[in-house]
Amino acid sequence: MTHTIKVPIMADLSQQGTKPEYLYWVGCAGAFDDRYQKVARAFVKILHHLGVSYAILGKEETCNGDPARRAGNEMLFHMQAAQVVQLLTRYEVKKMITTCPHCFNIFLNEYPDVGWRGEVIHHSQFLQQMIDEGKLKVPKDMFNNQKVVFHDPCYLGRGNNIYDAPRQVIDALETDRVEMPRNKSFALCCGAGGAQMFKEAEPGSKEVYAERTEEALATNAGIIATACPFCMTMLTDGIKYKNKEEEVKNLDIAEMIASSLGL
Amino acid sequence: MAKQLIFLFVLLITLGVFAWTMSRIFSFFNLTKSAFPVRNIGKRINITLKVAIGQSKILRWPFTGLLHALVFWGFMVITFGSFEMVIDGLAGTERVLGTFGIVYDIIIGSGDVFAAIVLIAILVFLARRLFLSIGRFKGEEIKTISKIDANIALTMILLLMVSLLGMNIGYVALHGNNQIGVYPVSQWLAGYITSGMTIYGANIFHEVNWWAHILLIFIFANILPYSKHFHVFTSIPNVFLSRLEPLGYLPNMGNVMNEVKLMMNPEAANVEAPPISRFGVKDVEDTSWKNYADALACTECGRCTAVCPAAITGKKLSPRKIFVDLRARMKEKGPGLIKNGIDYSDNKSLIRDYISEEELWACTTCNACAQECPININHPTLILDMRRYLVMEEAAAPAGLNMMFTNIENNGAPWQRGPEERLEWTESLNA
Ligand code: SF4
Ligand code: SF4
């Protein structure tokens, strides 16, 4: 039985005088990046499946200023931050889920400096928690011991010491999870962080994403799992660049969970 | 008595030169800006115990890590004996701390064993530098002089260990069965080296090694501040003064925040905030005391650069170079700044004359460097502070980034997509 999901919007709820438990911060990639839109869709499907009380900001959401700040434009960051803090304060947001480690990091670690402090949860942590609490039960036959390798996003891993949550989410599915030689705190960046996503790479002997993709492909995993929109862009490019689109898929952990649930 | 006077004289010269060098190096801290208040002493002690004393980060590279850890732990034990030598030298005593009995036996005994271990480790280190071609010992910032520096320091440590063992062997030969302390390695070596010696010969052997050892310590201590091996002194304090936030955290620029608030709402902002001379870091006088402490502590080991994605893929960025450059630039400009005041200029700057824009823009802020640095140096924060200068003072960002800024300003997203499109992904969502 299929039904249409209507994603709740903060402003609507507020007009009705209700408040959701969580704000899902979609992020610019979730809203605009063709590939990451699918992840946002997969994630809200899981939220509905679980019956989680949440809402998004919708048209009111605006960039939290992270790429500007990482590119050195502190002025622009503060202009965005002032707007975002105002929004979060207006809707009395106390708990926020993000599907982007960069959004996660800036809200968790840096927004307290600019006037908003709350519980910030990355979707890998959220999914892991739901699995741990037994609320999220996943059928195990979907991945049939397929080889999966997880690429650590820098701002989740080294940036905030979250290494186990995404792995435990993958391990909830029956997969044959393997590691790259450089994993966890030793993981190699995908090449997109620090606003690299928006500019040409400096001249060198190789692209960072190519180096990382080769490492991932060398594990012979059929699925490269990620949990970050930028990593997804880079590794998807890398897979294309290596002409491996047929054999190797790049999936977000939320997509893996959603598809195992048939969502 | 004559020996005591000579010793006192040499000791005073050593301490005098050392104090002079230190006051010079430390006077440069007056030129730097604030970084963070040093709070959470308990947490800092924990980090120091783990990262510095426990060598947790250097051990991330098991082989060389273990060798280094052994050298470090060896130094800690051996230093006890060096203090005793200073007391002996001044008071004309011999093995004066022997009164501590069993504790003394344990410390001096393990010092004797460690001397041999350190000696072997240093031989391995020297061989790696001299005969193997190891990537992380190379790089634009590693000039011939840096390589010589490394080899001199290693040789000095080697000689320190040889003389320490020599001294212990001589002592064992002289005192036979009524010696103070235990000397497992030297006892064994003495069987070969001093067995045929007369008491007179053994005395000279001991005396020569005793003086050689203490003089080498004095010389080494005074060479260190000019060497990358200064980390022998600076690394433990540097770890204690680590930044405590998660690596992902970037410090806020309160003055910019204030300026923005003032722009948006003239009454809300704190107008009292001190005016700022320059946004971000262009030159040494804009760096923080922590940046400079990091630069003094960097041992040029290259672990940071070895894991840097930019460096690995042939880009010009090397995180180690950032701190090698900062230290060199402070040495160059610091004296002029102290003499002529903070407005002094020599028509050069850290950015461009030392660190190119190309290097700064290649950083992904992945924090692999900061994660790896055995003494908790934080590179990305300083790189970001230099980007802040380039963008806010010179509007000198790469084209792609300027486009991203414009997009955020105009439509609140780094891409050319407007708020009205933000709900597109929610359309026809079925489950
Ligand atoms: S910054 Fe740290 S890791 Fe890099 S060379 Fe210096 S001491 Fe080694
Ligand atoms: S944070 Fe920057 S300098 Fe450090 S390893 Fe990553 S890319 Fe290199």
Image: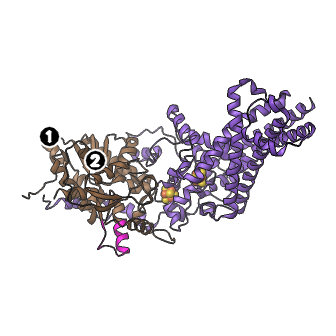
Left or right: A178 as drawn, with respect to B129? left
Give the magenta-colored segment's residue range: A235-249
Q: Is residue B376 above or below residue B101?
A: below
Left or right: A225 as drawn, with respect to B217? left
Left or right: B161 as drawn, with respect to A53? right
In depth, the one of B409 and A185 nearer the eye is A185
> Chain B: what color?
purple
In depth, the one of A69 and B95 nearer the eye is B95
Q: Residue B101 in magenta?
A: no
- Please identify, in this view, whether the residue under mark 2 or under mark 1 is nearer the observer: 2
When asked about the image quadrant of residue B131, the answer is: bottom right
Residue B371 percent location from the top left of the image: 50, 50
Residue B210 percent location from the top left of the image: 83, 39
| Tag 2 subunit | A
Residue type marked 1:
Gly
Letter of the brown chain: A
Give the residue displayed 71% in from the left and 25% down from the top. B101
